[in-house]
């Protein structure tokens, strides 16, 4: 059966993730649980993780795997409870606080995510993803100035971190500042000319600014990179609609 085959294949991967003594029963159960999780059998993995933790209450890998499975099952509160236990075992691990913040965001509670994400950044200033998520959280609680400050700082200190440009541009679009948004997307393209989402962002910004010829041009550039993406249907439809808005070309007879 394919599912069992996948579990067997992932068993060897999981065995490299756990650092407990090989003869430990908790270790063996955690390996099995990891293999199940890698095979996307999240419900099945939960039981094995719990059994592993019952045998070793300090087994951080088992707690981590259990929290991950709960998150994939969208049981965010349970994932948070497990991650809180992890922070008690190790309060210097930024990834535990980062995941707590992500769970809060996923559960629609950005205000609760902020302190966790700040803690993750304090522990590891190189955690760029935590900074991005913090900016998103501030945006969701209607603090756009703080979000922009974070994006600007990220772009200044980590100019190759392209997600900061894209998120800043998308946020500016959401604020209705399409002119500034297009400038940010152009900055992004200078860093990576193949960043297809930037072309779509520019096209949509020009569209809103009623620069229809430019919008069509960038919708086409986007389609040149992602013709069969989910957004391609929208781009194609918008091109046809904008063509109707362009002034009709006049035909002049050439007199010889």
Image (tube, rainbow, N blue to C red):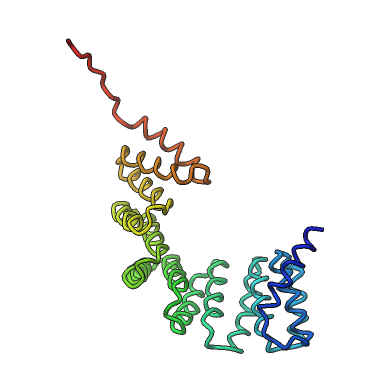
Q: Residue at x 52, y 43 (%)?
A: 228
- In the current view of this chain or complex, which residue is farthest to the top? 256
Q: Residue at x 30, y 25 (%)?
A: 248
- In the current view of this chain or complex, which residue is farthest to the left? 256
Where is residue 243 shown, x and y percent of the image? 37, 31
Q: Nearer the viewer, residue 143 or 74?
A: 74
Q: Nearer the viewer, residue 64 or 194?
A: 194
Q: Residue at x 42, y 38 (%)?
A: 238
Where is residue 24 shown, x and y percent of the image? 77, 87
Total number of numbered labels? Answer: 0
Q: Residue at x 53, y 46 (%)?
A: 230
Where is residue 197 shown, x and y percent of the image? 43, 52
Please state, as top left, top right, bottom left or bottom right, where the C terminus lies in the image.
Answer: top left
In the image, 245: left or right of 256? right
Place residue 83 in its image quadrant. Answer: bottom right
Image position of 187 with respect to 100: above or below: above
- In the current view of this chain or complex, which residue is farthest to the right? 1
In the image, 27: left or right of 126? right
């Amino acid at each position: 059966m394919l599912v069992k085959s996948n579990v067997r294949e992932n068993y060897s991967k999981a065995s490299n993730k756990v650092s407990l003594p090989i003869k430990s029963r908790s270790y063996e159960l955690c390996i099995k649980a990891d293999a199940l999780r890698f095979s996307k059998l999240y419900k099945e993995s939960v039981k094995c993780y719990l059994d592993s933790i019952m045998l070793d209450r300090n087994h951080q890998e088992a707690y981590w795997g259990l929290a991950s499975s709960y998150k994939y099952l969208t049981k965010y509160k349970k994932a948070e409870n497990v991650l809180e236990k992890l922070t008690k075992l190790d309060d210097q691990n930024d990834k535990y606080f980062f995941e707590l913040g992500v769970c809060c965001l996923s559960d629609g509670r950005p205000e609760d995510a902020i302190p966790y994400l700040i803690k993750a950044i304090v522990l590891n200033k190189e955690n760029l993803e935590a900074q991005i998520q913090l900016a998103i959280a501030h945006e969701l609680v209607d603090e756009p100035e703080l979000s922009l400050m974070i994006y600007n700082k990220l772009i200044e200190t980590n100019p190759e971190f392209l997600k900061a440009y894209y998120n800043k541009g998308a946020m500016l679009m959401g604020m209705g500042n399409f002119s500034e948004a297009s400038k940010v997307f152009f900055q992004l393209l200078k860093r990576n000319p193949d960043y297809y989402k930037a072309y779509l962002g520019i096209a949509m910004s020009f569209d809103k600014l009623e620069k229809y010829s430019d919008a069509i041009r960038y919708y086409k550039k986007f389609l040149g990179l992602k013709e069969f993406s989910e957004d391609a249907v929208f781009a194609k439809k918008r091109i046809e609609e904008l063509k109707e808005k362009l002034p009709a070309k006049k035909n002049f007879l050439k007199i010889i």
